[in-house]
Image: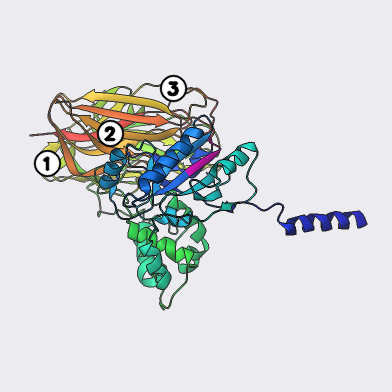
Amino acid sequence: MSHLKSSLFVALSVLASGAFALPERAGDFALLDTEGNFHQLSRYRHMEALVLMSYDASCANIDQAVAQFENLQADWADKSVAFALINSSTAQDIDQLRAARAAQGIELPLLIDDGQLVSETLSFSAAGEVTVLDPARLNLLYRGPVQGSVSQVLESELAGGVDETVIAASTGCELQYPAREQHASSVPDYSTEVAPIIAEQCASCHREGGIGPFAMDSHLMLQGWSPMIREVLLTKRMPPTQVDPYIGHFDNARYISNDDLQTVVHWIDAGAPRGAGAEDPLATLQFPDRREWQMGEPDFIVKAPTHEIPATGVLDYINVDVELPFDEDKWVRGVQYIAGDESVLHHLLTYVTAPLETAEGEAAQGSVATRFLEGYAPGKVDAMMFPEDTGVFIPKGHKLSMQFHYTTNGRATTDETLLGLYMYDEPPEHENFTRSVAGMFLIPPYARDHKASARYTFDEDVVVTGLRAHMHFRGKDMKFTVEYPDGTTKDLLSVPAYSYAWQPTYQLSEPAVLPVGTTAHVTGTFDNSEFNPANPDPSKQLSFGLQSWDEMFIGYWTYHAAE
């Protein structure tokens, strides 16, 4: 016993002396760069360190600081160290940043921190200041001038790890944080400022019985989950807006403004105070029942066959044909699915097919145009109304072909899904089609950035109204680009941080008119490495397959003929 006490005394003495001091925790974060590429600290775990320098194009000395930073990068070019700039000023917009980067001949990625929240979190005080980050432990190893002890810190990290954060004073153009200063002097009010943002952006999913993992239905719940909320906001996991906001605009993308982000994060940083409001706005929110018809009673309800789902096992896709009783042509203007058990219904696709036709669904390869009615998938749970004066045509005698994909979750259950159809009284002007533009691929084991592509050239004038990216767990990013007959190109949609859990059809705010001869390009990347947190098996070589742990590469284009 005396030996145990002696050992404990020595251990406590060592801890008290600071011999095992740990570096400061930086936390995870994610930003896009000026070229639309996605950068997340934790996704740099294949590197020993990530070195960032704060950037302000308006700073008189920034050219010199960038040159010094580039020289530092050259010294570590053959090491596992990544370098990037981070715009820490609100003085320039993305076009100005791109122009400044081009004028200076900067080849380093320039991350866009237009809300300054990451720069705040890293405590940047001056343009040209440098941080060294450990992507595996999410720790801050160094903050100070570029000519400071950066190399010594990197050498220590590569030799086995840095024991404590090194902080050195920096000189240069002082960074201003107007939103932080405003909220420090007047903390955002929960009832009038924070709760309305949560109600608009989060609560419809994060509610009792919703698809979110916890309910945001009171201040107490919000306060308890505030560290998680801060993290998912800074890593761009939530709200689940996967699109690059600088490419196109989409009516159903869940954009959130920098002002709203700053309000919520600064409120959390202040301790998530309740404030003086007598009533809790989140506790009084009312939501429509997801098992109710959002647009009123449908004109026709399809009751899918009952499917018994076992507790465990792998289930093949289930293809079902549903006969329709219509004695005349019909035009569909909107649809809504009500899942029988959304905990196991992974996705459901519905097509209009001729009596002897079989819909291949996601098994289709190459480029195929279909009368795709609509699908149910993660992130697509609301009623869907087609663009004005467009619809899906159901000729007399045609049927619906439904493709179900279930995933077991350890509990046996029954699924009986409903599909509500809302019809036009008179035929619309345009018929909707959905074309799958799919590419073949072979992904090697452990490949971190495996490129894929597919294309299709339209043989008529078309108007594109919606786009949807589809990959599985290794999907990293996907971009939709059109190449016009004159050779010019335009990006329509970029999904820089693809998530298998969220794959809606993005509705273009301004439909894209494409002349005959326009080529639709779909390009993307797979991450089959062990550094992809969603990857079920990085050792597997992958080609096209139907199951979730296999892979697909399909870009869906919804369009109608132009007249």
Q: Earlier in the sequence, mark 2 or mark 1?
A: 1
Residue at the extreme right of the image, as rendered: 2
Farthest residue, direction left: 563
Mark 2: secondary structure? strand
Tag 1, which secondary structure? Answer: loop
Front tag of 2 and 1:
2
- Which quadrant: the C terminus? top left
Q: Which amino acid does label 1 sit on?
A: Pro
Residue 428's label in the rendered image is: 1
Res 327 label: none
Residue range of the region highlighted in magenta in the rendering: 46-51
Instruction: From the image, state whether disc 2 or disc 3 is nearer to you.
Output: 2
Can you give x and y, in whole percent of width and height, for residue 116 in the image? 39, 55
Compared across the picture, whether 221 is left or right of 420 comes to right
Residue situated in front as seen by the camera: 100 or 242: 100
Q: How many marks?
A: 3
Reading the image, the residue beneath label 2 is 480
Determine which residue is flagged by label 3.
543
Percent x, y for residue 2? 92, 57
> In this view of the protein, which residue sits in the foreground, 397 or 501?
501
